[in-house]
Image (cartoon, grey):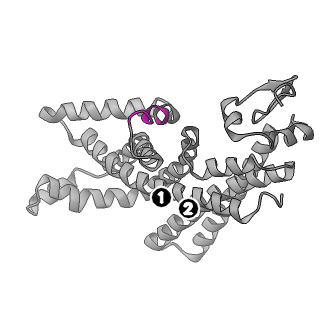
Amino acid sequence: MASVLTADNLNFMMSGMKLTLEIAVLASALSILMGTILALMKTYCRGTLGFLNILATVYVEIFRCTPQLLWILMFRFFVTGGGFNLGVVSLSVVSAPYVCEIVRGGLNNISHGQFEAGYSQGFHFIGILWYIVLPQTFRAIIPSLMSQITSIIKSTSLLASINIFEYLFTCNTVMLNATSIGGIFTVYAMEAAGYFIVCYLLVVLVNTLGRSAEGRTDMEAMEKKTEIRTVGIMGAGAVGAYFLWGMRNLPCGTLCLIARGERKERLQRDGMIINGERFLYPVKTPEEA
C-alpha cells in the first residue's frame, strides 16, 4: 500500500482529476447550449421550419438509443487536436440529447399565456424566449440539469477506453505498479472517492442553492441534508460491494500476478485466462517469461 501512495503517484492521479474536471466543465457547457437549441427546435419549429424539428428528433433519438462508448470510440477517428479536444467534443455530442429532453420538459411546462403576455408588451418571439421563457425554464430544471452534469462527470471515465489521461486512466496506470492486494484496493478506493467527492459536492451545492431559492424551513433543510448523507453512504457502500463481488474468485496469488508486467502488454492482452485462472490484467505466461 505504501508503494502506491507515493508523491509521484498522487501527483499523477491528481493530474488526471484536473483533466477530468476541465473536460467535464467544458463538455457540460457545450451540451447545455446544444441541448437548449435542440429543445427549442423540437418544441417551436413548426410549419416551414418543421424540417428542423425532424432533424433534431432524429439526432436526439439516435444518440439516446445507442451506447455512448460506441460514439466515443468512433469520434477518435474524426476529432483532431489531442485527447482534451476529443473528450470535450465526444461528451458534448453524446450528452446534448439528454439535456435536450430535460430542457424540453421545462419548456412544455411554460403556459402559452406567457407568450401572449410578452406580445402584449411589445416583445418579439426571440425576446420572449430570452427574457421570459428560458429564465423560467432553467429555474425549474436546475435539479435535473445538475443530475445530468453529474452524469457527464462520471462519463469522463469512458474516455479511458481511448487512452485519454483522465482520472480513471491515471488511477488504473498506478494500480499496475501495486504489489499487494492492499495496494490494489487502495487505488480502487481512491477512484471511487475521487468521483464521489466531486459529485457529492455538486449535489450539496445544488441543494443549498435550492433551499435558498425556495426559502425552506430549518427542519426541511435538516431533513434534506440527512437524506443526501444517507444516499451518499449507500452509494459508497454499493461501490465497495461491487469491487468486492467482482474480485471474489481471485486468489491472493493471482492478485499479486495482476500487479506485475508491462502496461502495454496488459492492455493488448486484456481478459486472458491462463491455466484456468482469470486475470483482471494480462500477465506473461511462464513460457514467455
Identified at 8% across, 61% down, the residue is: 122
Question: Total label count?
Answer: 2
Residue 230, can we see it? no
Left or right of residue 162, residue 62 in this image: left
Choose mark 2 or mark 1, whichever is in front: 1
Of residue 192 and residue 32, the one placed in the foreground of this image is: 192
Report the residue at 58% width, 71% height from top.
221
Residue at horizontal 10%, vertical 56%?
124
Residue pointed to by mark 2? 203
Q: Residue at x 43, y 58 (%)?
A: 142
> Can you give x and y, in whole percent of width and height, for residue 289 in the image?
84, 31
Residue 18 appears in the rendering: yes
Instruction: Give the label on residue 22, or none.
Output: 1
Tell me if residue 3 comes above or below residue 80 in the rendering.
below
Question: Range of the magenta residues?
Answer: 72-78
Badge 2 element: helix
Q: Can you name the residue that lies furthest to the left here?
A: 122
